[in-house]
Amino acid sequence: MNVADRPPRDAIHSTPVSGAVIVAHGERGGSFSNAIVKGHAVAASKALPDVAVAAGVLSGEPTFEAALAEVASRTDGEILIYPFFMAPGYFVNTKIPKRIADAGLAERCRMLETFGSSAPLPAVILQQALASASELGAEPQASRLLLVGHGSKVSRASAEATEAVAACLRALGGFGVVATAFLEEAPFVEDVVLSDNHRPTVVVGFFNGDGLHAAEDVPQMIGKFDGPIGYTGPVGAFDDASRLIADVIHQACTKTARDTSA
């Protein structure tokens, strides 16, 4: 059951039984991108009154450590760590656990799957892409969905996460073609966009925020396309992203409660 389907709780509530910190990389001076993760935390707090929820970033404000301290002070229960990242990698596997340990909270924290790995995410992306195709006046089956990931010259994590979601999108159907492209590795965005220069195309940014890549790089790279083209922006800023995050946290809390009572 989605959190939105549950009946409202009384406004006056006891101490939260568990906590959750939504953590993103963040950007120094990137107030808009950092505001996205804070907005998801606010939405999750409203949907989950039994859970103490806060947001923190590894770079910028509010800091990850401040969010951890806030949640730890509000509940004696388990603290779930929700990585608002598109793929596991150095930050999720190494940096975040180290900063949790340095804060003295390793024994209380449990890491959840990354945002980009969430099972419901492909369906959310598909609905947004179909809406974008409708705005273009394009028939989805005659159109291309282009999923743009960050990519990397060093690690395969970003590309693998992007390709995994693209495979799910192909299985879901809806678009005639589902392709992938990357900013920092082949196949590059401009090359893929121009390889099919007349098919109506919906571009989806497989990013968690509206930073430089999502807000400037992708729009510039697709600007040479001759046919109908639409850009959804980053998936992390989709309206349904907050609901998805709250659902994952709710399911994790439910599992913890079930395991504890067993």
Image: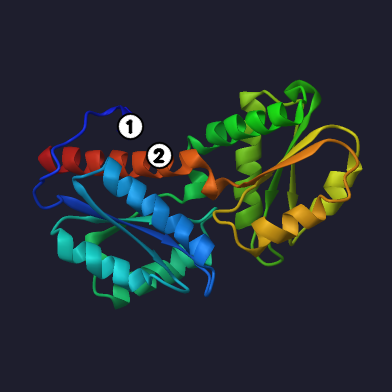
Residue in view at x 35 percent, y 43 percent:
246
Q: Quadrant of residue 49?
A: top left
Q: Is residue 250 above or below residue 60?
A: above
Q: Is residue 130 above or below residue 205?
A: above
Kindly report the distance in space between the C-alpha atoms of the residues bearing marks 2 and 1.
Answer: 8 Å
What residue sits right under mark 2 in the picture? 243
Q: Is residue 181 above or below residue 81?
A: above
Q: Is residue 53 above or below residue 48?
A: below
Quadrant where the C terminus sits is: top left
Q: With 191 as the anchor, is 112 left or right in this view?
A: left
Label count reads 2
* Residue 231 point in image, percent of width and height: 70, 43
- Nearest to the observer: residue 212 or residue 115: 212
What residue sits right under mark 1 in the picture? 4
Name the residue type under label 2.
Answer: Arg
Residue in view at x 38 percent, y 70 percent:
62
Mark 2–mark 1 contact, CB under 8 Å? yes
Quick one: label 2 or label 1, which is nearer the N terminus? 1
> Is residue 112 something one can see in this rendering?
no
Name the residue type under label 1.
Answer: Ala
SS class, disc 1: helix
Q: With 218 as the anchor, is 257 left or right in this view?
A: left
